[in-house]
Image (cartoon, helix red, strand yellow):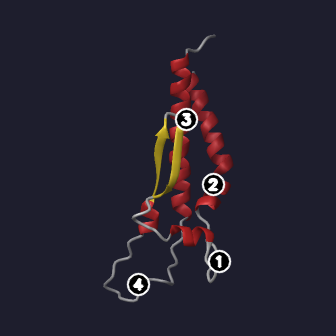
Amino acid sequence: MTIDAWKINSAVGGALLDSVMMLTNEIIAITPRDPKRLPLDPSVKVTWSLKRSIDFQQVWELEYKIGTKQWEAEYWKYLEFGTPRMAPRSFLRKGIADSRDKVLKNFWLRLAQGLK
């Protein structure tokens, strides 16, 4: 059985996009929000801006970048890596590490489906 290059590229691209979306959703699910640290002023709305800022972007044909939109939640790096006075509350690295096997399994499954 022969498979042409276009079908392989399409299958890999579809499997990769699906896996990137899955990983992004896994990271969003564990993004920290401390319910004990609500705004002092009750009229101030909780924005969940860090969760909303997490997204992915295609940077090349088969290359994606997952991260935060800097202008929406500039403080992500303080949560991810900590500060001299605050321990890290990693969500990007933890999300990748915790979801690795699940996302890889999804990738290979989607790739096999795309090559049928």
Distance CA(mark 1)–CA(mark 4): 21 Å
Residue drawn 57% across the image and 34% down it: 110
Residue 98 sits in which quadrant? bottom right
Residue drawn 64% across the image and 35% down it: 108
Circle 4 is placed at which residue position? Answer: 39
Label 1 close to label 2 by CB (< 8 Å): no
Distance CA(mark 2)–CA(mark 4): 30 Å
Percent position of residue 90, x then y: 62, 67
Circle nearer the viewer, 1 or 2:
1
- Residue 53 sits above or below residue 58 on the image: below
Label 1 close to label 3 by CB (< 8 Å): no
For marks 1 and 4 on the same chain, the one whose residue lies earlier in the sequence = 4
For marks 3 and 2 on the same chain, the one whose residue lies earlier in the sequence = 3
Circle 1: element type = loop
Circle 1 is placed at which residue position? Answer: 87
For marks 2 and 4 on the same chain, the one whose residue lies earlier in the sequence = 4
Circle nearer the viewer, 1 or 4:
1
Tell me the crowding category of disc 4: few under 14, some 14 to 19, or many 20 or more residues within 10 angstroms, Cα based. Answer: few
For marks 4 and 3 on the same chain, the one whose residue lies earlier in the sequence = 3
Circle 3 is placed at which residue position? Answer: 15
Circle nearer the viewer, 1 or 3:
1
Residue 70 disc label: none
**Which quarter of the rendering shows the C terminus?**
top right
- Residue 92 sits above or below residue 109 on the image: below
Residue type beneath disc 4: Pro
Residue type beneath disc 2: Ile
Residue type beneath disc 3: Ala
Q: Residue furthest front?
A: 84
Residue 47 sits in which quadrant? bottom left
Tell me the crowding category of disc 2: few under 14, some 14 to 19, or many 20 or more residues within 10 angstroms, Cα based. Answer: some
Residue 96 disc label: 2
